[in-house]
């Protein structure tokens, strides 16, 4: 049980670290190869590109967990805890619906790629591994939205302040 709680708390952080390190190391190798040996590879560019795509989608999930997405929250400073919780719940529901629709359509792309057996140009491996970044990202986002919704409903019931995340600027 503690292991699952630890995964829930840190899954995105570890995944972001893995993809970021992969991106930085591959990019450094490619710059070195290009500048020192006047040679670059197609696979290096692909690894960097697809690592960045995974970073973006996993980062979106982490931002939902921490309520760190960019938003205009001027009105939030002037309303009480109950309306604030209701607004956050409404936002979570809207985003949940968008994420479910996007998840469905992103799987369509993966299925088409599987049907035709498309492979990447440089690595020559199935493109499904890279197209899965979008469904994986939306699945993580849906999970975090459910958690956020439950957290906000609990705050609404208890009459406590809703979790607002960390502010970027104060």
Image (cartoon, rainbow, N blue to C red):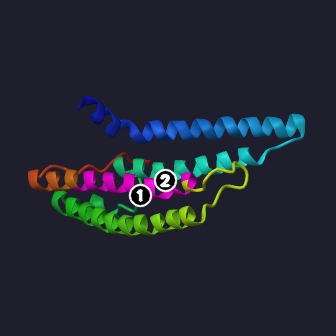
Q: Which mark is residue 16?
A: none
Is residue 25 left or right of 4 when viewed as pictured?
A: right
Q: Is residue 136 magenta?
A: yes
Quarter of the picture containing the N terminus is top left
Q: Quadrant of residue 4?
A: top left
Magenta extent: 129-149
Q: Residue at x 75, y 35 (%)?
A: 29
Q: Is residue 22 above or below residue 89?
A: above
Q: Which mark is residue 57?
A: 2
The foreground one among 58 and 135 is: 135
Q: Position of residue 140 (x, y in %)?
A: 38, 51
Task: Examine the rendering and report whether any part of residue 30 can be seen.
Answer: yes
Circle 2 Cα neighbour tier, 10 Å, few/some/many (<14 / 14–19 / ≥20): many
Q: Residue at x 46, y 49 (%)?
A: 58
Q: Residue at x 30, y 51 (%)?
A: 164
Is residue 144 left or right of 115 when viewed as pictured?
A: left
Look at mark 1 in the image and give the residue it sits on. Answer: 138
Tell me, yes or no, whether the two marked residues, 1 and 2, touch with CB atoms within 8 Å.
yes
Q: Residue furthest right?
A: 38
Q: Residue furthest top?
A: 2
Circle 1 Cα neighbour tier, 10 Å, few/some/many (<14 / 14–19 / ≥20): many
Mark 1 vs mark 2, CA separation in Å: 7 Å
Label 1: state its secondary structure.
Answer: helix
Q: Position of residue 158 (x, y in %)?
A: 10, 50
Q: Earlier in the sequence, mark 1 or mark 2?
A: 2
Q: Position of residue 51 (x, y in %)?
A: 59, 46
Q: Is residue 148 magenta?
A: yes
């Amino acid at each position: 049980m503690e292991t699952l709680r630890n995964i829930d708390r840190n899954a995105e952080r570890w995944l972001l670290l893995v993809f970021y390190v992969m991106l930085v190391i591959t990019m450094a190798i490619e710059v070195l190869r290009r500048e020192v040996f006047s040679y670059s590879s197609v696979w290096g560019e692909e690894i960097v590109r697809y690592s960045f795509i995974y970073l973006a989608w996993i980062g979106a999930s982490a931002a939902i967990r921490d309520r760190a997405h960019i938003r205009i929250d001027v009105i939030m400073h002037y309303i009480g805890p109950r309306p604030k919780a209701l607004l956050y719940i409404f936002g979570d529901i809207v985003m949940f619906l968008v994420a479910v629709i996007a998840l469905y359509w992103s799987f369509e792309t993966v299925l088409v790629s599987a049907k035709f057996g498309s492979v990447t140009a440089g690595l020559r491996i199935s493109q499904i591994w890279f197209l899965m970044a979008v469904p994986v990202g939306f699945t993580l986002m849906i999970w975090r939205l459910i958690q956020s919704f439950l957290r906000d409903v609990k705050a609404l019931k208890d009459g406590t302040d809703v979790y607002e995340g960390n502010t970027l600027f104060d």
